[in-house]
Image (spheres, rainbow, N blue to C red):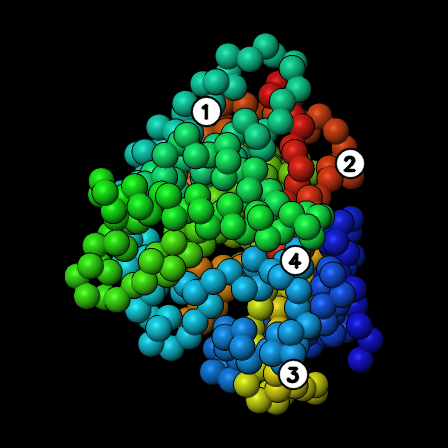
Amino acid sequence: MTRIALDPFVTDLDGESARLRAAGPLAEVELPGGVHCYAVTHHAEARQLLTDSRVVKDINVWTTWQRGEIPMDWPLIGLANPGRSMLTVDGADHRRLRTLVAQALTVKRVERLRAGIEALTTASLDRLSALPRGEQIDLKAEFAYPLPMNVISELMGVDGADHPRLKELFEKFFSTQTPPEEVPQMMADLGALFTKIVDAKRENPGDDLTSALIAASEDGDHLTDEEIVNTLQLIIAAGHETTISLIVNAVVALQTHPEQRKQVLGGEVPWENVIEETLRWKTPTSHVLIRFATEDVEVGDKVLPKGEALIVSFGALGRDEAQYGPTAGDFDVTRSPNRHIAFGHGPHVCPGAALSRLEAGVALPALYERFPDLELAVPASELRNKPIVTQNDLYDLPVELG
């Protein structure tokens, strides 16, 4: 099996995903930093593995980790071993840690946030409307970033004053280009910041999910301080990064497919189709780290060996022709059915999927209603991916509002 090295600079994600699919359904890959693992790259096999009890989240199953071959300054250490939370445990422990979060993020409860999301969206668009026409702006920084960060912070009870520091630390946390000597301090700083937030909520609880996690712990659900801090960090990280990428990628897709944009703006195709097709075609999450095999697991005609690590390559399986047919590589807002698994599958499916869809479902139509003549300020080929192997994320999105 030929090993495919993931590009730490993410210069050609689509090409890399195609190579992974061609090597699939199980491909040997090398992560940045020279760490070996396997990737599942086809839709059907990914669904199988995501519900296979022999593939677990316990990093202690990983033979390479057991041998001490993963240095603590590995740039992806925070993603492979982010501490104890619902992301890193299975079974009863996973259900215990996930229950409160899942209850807070049901579709019905998320819908109650619509009015607040609409108000935040309107405020952002008002700021953009006040800018001189013809001026180039970064739509990611000015629109796609503030909305999900403000929404998830309000949900979790995080003060807006912490946003600049969070942005700085998360830039280092996700990047493969963070110097190894800075990784331990970055991880310590993130832990200290979220510990401070939890301590403040313990002193002055509010109507937010962090306060609810603390209360549940005190009422006998036995969440440790580490579990509360790590759960908060996980939800804040996943709760804004994915939605930023979804909004940005949807705008790029529409701007590079003008006939489909015309159909959407003319009301012939619902915005829901745009969101689902973007999630499939330009999935916000390119690779999810990491699961571990407790025994040999057959994957198609290949085997995931016992003690090996597995990543799920969502960017590859989102264009699997076996699932989506010969047009899998095309962006098509009329695609039906569109049964992607961009938010995962099985017990670890993203509990924030409904919230992300709602935010994009409010933000995108409002943006194009206010600025129907919006144009990319640079050719799409010049847009630059950030060096993040887990996220399909751009540095910026230069546009002219028209």
Disc nearest the viewer among 2 and 4: 4
**Residue wearing tag 2:** 382
Q: Are marks 1 and 4 in contact (CB under 8 Å)?
A: no
Q: Are marks 1 and 2 in contact (CB under 8 Å)?
A: no
**Residue wearing tag 4:** 73
Name the N-terminal-most of marks 1 and 2.
Answer: 1
Task: Give the structural element (helix, strand or loop) at label 3.
Answer: strand
Side of 324 relative to 84 (left or right) = right
> Which residue is at a point 41% across and 63% down the rendered structure image?
85
Q: Are marks 2 and 4 in contact (CB under 8 Å)?
A: no
CA gap between label 1 and label 3 equals: 47 Å
Disc nearest the viewer among 1 and 3: 3
**Residue wearing tag 1:** 124
Residue 65 higher or lower than 224, as above or below? below
Residue 301 higher or lower than 180, as above or below? below
Q: Amino acid at mark 1?
A: Ser
Q: Amino acid at mark 4?
A: Asp
- Picture disc at residue 154: none
CA gap between label 1 and label 4 equals: 38 Å
Side of 35 relative to 271 (left or right) = right
